[in-house]
Structure formats: structure tokens, C-alpha cells
Amino acid sequence: MAVRPIRKILIANRGEIALRVIRTCREMGIRTVAVYSAADRTAPHVLAADEALPIGPPPSRESYLHIGRILGAASVSGADAIHPGYGFLSENPEFARGVRDAGLVFIGPSPETIASMGDKTAARSLASGAGVPIVPGTAGPVSGGPEAAEFCARHGYPVLVKAAGGGGGKGMRIVREESELIPSLRGAASEARSAFGDERVYIEKYFEDPRHIEIQVLADSRGNTVHLGERECSIQRRHQKVVEESPSVIVDERMRSRMGETAVMVARACGYKNAGTVEFLVDGEKNFYFLEMNTRLQVEHPVTELRTGLDLVALQILIAKGEDLPFTQEGVRFRGHAIECRICAEDTENNFLPSTGTITHLRAPAGPGIRDDRGVEQGDEIGVYYDPMMAKLIAWGGTRDEAIARLVRALREYELLGVRTNIPLCLFVLTHPRFAAGDISTHFIGRYFSPGTLLAGAPIEEGAAAAVCALIAGGMEGGGSAALPPASGHWRGHRRDFLRGR
């Protein structure tokens, strides 16, 4: 493949990922074009880009999901390429095809690859054909109750009903007994139809206490494919990731090598090019099973960047241009430990309802090993139209303990008023004894956390999180606890407000 010059990139996204791409482009001497809805006219990504073009009203379907308007903006701006970020149109094969047909470079895999891996049942079939272990499940979408009941009778409950054409936890239901099966099929299909325009669902065997571990892969046009190690993504709420880290405490070198080689097999089986992530479910005996492949950059990619020293966005652009990967698998080096929290506008005390309003005060943390990937600034309006994630706070340390300590310190320094945030939840997780011990699963939050924990400040199972409960619920004004050293100065008397976003 001949190397194709890229001098200007349009970012078909918003928020922190748009800023993330803009910063790498600036380092590479590439001009950038931002697109924005009417709600984002003065958003940070708009102000940071070299050029910015409006693409419609606030609703996503009329702006960030409107293929025609985004391609029109690319034509008007004279962009050479489009970076989709994540979410929105990033895994839409029709969009990738439209970019290619317009004579532009799509910074991601081919539309054919996106289509083959975007259909979860097709992806499972492809992985199985490549000799990759998969979670037991139906061969394709289920056509109705009898087919679903037959699978459940053969494999036993519990099972998981999942959307065939989407992800992110939408169109997903756990079924623990026969009476729940038909309502769950209908509910999942309805949600999938609303979220993805595709009501097909399939069924997998459900594991009670699994871990969710993913492998970052890169592949160039010459077939050079490497993995960049694992990310532990088991701390989730309603199938949405909250905390991610690398390395995983349960993955040793042999397991890392096996999982990495398996992820590379999946990438090669679908002819993958660019950056992607292969996700696995891991059981209590460290057996791992293919879940799906995300054909885009992941929200948690900074965790891998901090451990490897690589710029994944820069590598995406180099691969899209047609250049070879500048290293082999043997050239990948890992150092230390990295951990990330997603900072969202959510009310942790009210069932995590989205919180809206104007950010009246914002001061982000800094210091050794801290990276703040943020898409908002003081004065910005947090509305109802988009995902509530405002920022990602990432810490690096020489050891896991050091990385956790740095992230706890940084979370306590995070000052944000005007909307409520999930920072109390992040602190709860990071200071929990079972998290410190690496004793986690995808059910960690559901099992140990409740909003009442924050309000009451009382110890929960085996005294877990007593320190952070005291910090959040009542001990703040007095200056902290033994587990979490006291803050100083202007924080005294106000830390609870900053943490909760009041």
C-alpha cells in the first residue's frame, strides 16, 4: 500500500476524545477540523481545532450521527481524512464506506471489517472458526421463545440476552429462571432497536463472577500485527466501565502471552488494520473466552499509553497513511502500573441519574504521574443530549499501590461544582480492601456499593470502605482519616461539596 499524505483531519466527534486527537495532530504538524452541534458552539474541542464547522441541532441523530452533514463538512474544509473517535459513528460501516467513497482516509479499519466484527454473532463465528474459545451461546440471533428456551434447557440458567448489533451494555438482560426469559427477550430487543436500529438478540451462557479483560492490538497494511498487553476492565456499573487498569493482577506472563497471541489471531482472521481491542471474559480458573472486538480506539486507551510510552492516536494515523508499524512484538516494552477513572456527571446518591447544569467551578488535579483527559471547562453547560462522561483521570506509578495512591490523591483534589459527579463512587472502589487485594469481578459495584453507603458513612462488609465513607459522609470537615491523609487549606469544610459537585 502506497503511503498517502494526510495534512488535515476532521474529527467526527466531540468532548475529550476530540481534544485528544487534536493534540496529537498538532504534534504531528497536521491541521484539524472540529465539527459541532448547536449545543457545542463554544465547546473546548471547537476552540482548540484549527477550523470548526457546524453540523446541526443538539440531538445526536441530527448532528454527530448525521453522516451526510459530517461528510459535507469534510468536503467544505478540504480534509484529507476523518478520525471517528469512539462512540457515535466510530463503528458504523456505512459511515466508513461513505468516507472511503468520498476519496478520504478513514482512520480505522475497513468498512468490511467493521461490519464483520460489529455483528456480535458473526464475530463469534469468525473467532470460533479461527480456533479461539468463545462463551457458549446461540449460533446466531434467536428467532423466538422456543429456540431460546431450547438453548437454556441445554445449557442451564443463568443466561445473558445480548444485542447482536450493538454494545455498551444496551440491549442486555440477565435471565436467571424460565419465567424471565420471554420478558427479557422482548425488553432487550426493544432497547436494541431503540439504541442501534437493530432488534436482533442472541443468548450466551452467563458467568456469575467473571473478569472482563481486554487486549489492545495494532495492525498495519502489511499484516504486521502486535498486541500491547491487557487492560483489566472488571469494575463496571450496569455493563459500563468505571475503572480500568493495566496490568491485571491475575494475568502472569504466560497468560498475557496466550491472551495476546489469541487477540492477534482474531485480528488476522478478520483482516484487521489500525487500532482495535479484543475483549475477553475470564472465569475463576483463568480460562478466557472471546466476547467481541471493538473496531475503534477505546475510552481507556490512555492506560496502555502510560504503560508502553506509545501514542495510539499517532500510530492510528501512521497506519491509515499506509506506513508500517515502527516496531515488532519484541519491541513492545511495559513499565509500571496505570489506572483510570471515568469522571461522569451523575448523581451517585440518586441511582446515578445524569446530572445537568453549568460547571461553576473547575480545578483539575495535577502532580506526579497524573494525566487528566478532559472535555469540559469552567462555564460549560452539561446538558441532556450526550454521554455524561466529562473527563478521564489516569494515574501511573511504579507499582499498583503507588498508582492507586496517586489516583486517590488526585480524585480528592478534583474540584468541580455545578453538577454532581461519580467521584465518590471512584473513591469508594479505589479504597475498598477487596479492590486493593485484586479480588474483583464485573459484579464488584453491584455487590459492595449502594448510595446509602455514602450517605450513612457506616462500615459495610468486613469494614470495607469505612475510610472513604467517613471522608465523604461526615469526616471531611475534620480533616480526613488515617487511610486517606487530610487535605489542606481551602479544601477544609468544602471537600464534600467538590466531590459531589454541589
Image: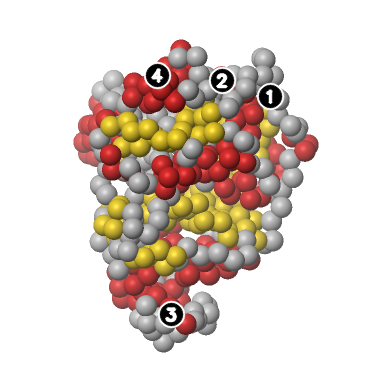
Q: Which amino acid does label 3 sit on?
A: His
> Mark 4 to mark 3: distance in Å?
52 Å
Quarter of the image with the N terminus is top right
Nearer to us of marks 2 and 4 is 4
Q: Residue 369: horizontal and vertical position, in percent?
A: 62, 61
Which picture quadrant has residue 157? top left
Instruction: Please tell me which of labels 4 and 3 falls first in the chain.
Output: 4
Disc 1 element: loop
Instruction: Please tell me which of labels 2 and 3 falls first in the chain.
Output: 2
Q: Name the residue under label 4.
A: 94
> Mark 2 to mark 1: distance in Å?
20 Å
Residue neighbourhood size for the residue with mark 3, other residues' Cα within 10 Å, grouped as few (<14), some (14–19), many (≥20): few
Q: Are marks 2 and 4 in contact (CB under 8 Å)?
A: no
Q: Name the residue under label 2.
A: 270
> Mark 2 to mark 3: distance in Å?
55 Å
Q: What residue type is labelled 4?
A: Glu
Nearer to us of marks 4 and 3 is 3
Q: Do the residues labelled 1 and 3 touch (CB within 8 Å)?
A: no
Instruction: Please tell me which of labels 1 and 3 falls first in the chain.
Output: 1
Q: What's the residue at 72%, 43% (across, down)?
A: 254
Instruction: Please tell me which of labels 2 and 1 falls first in the chain.
Output: 2
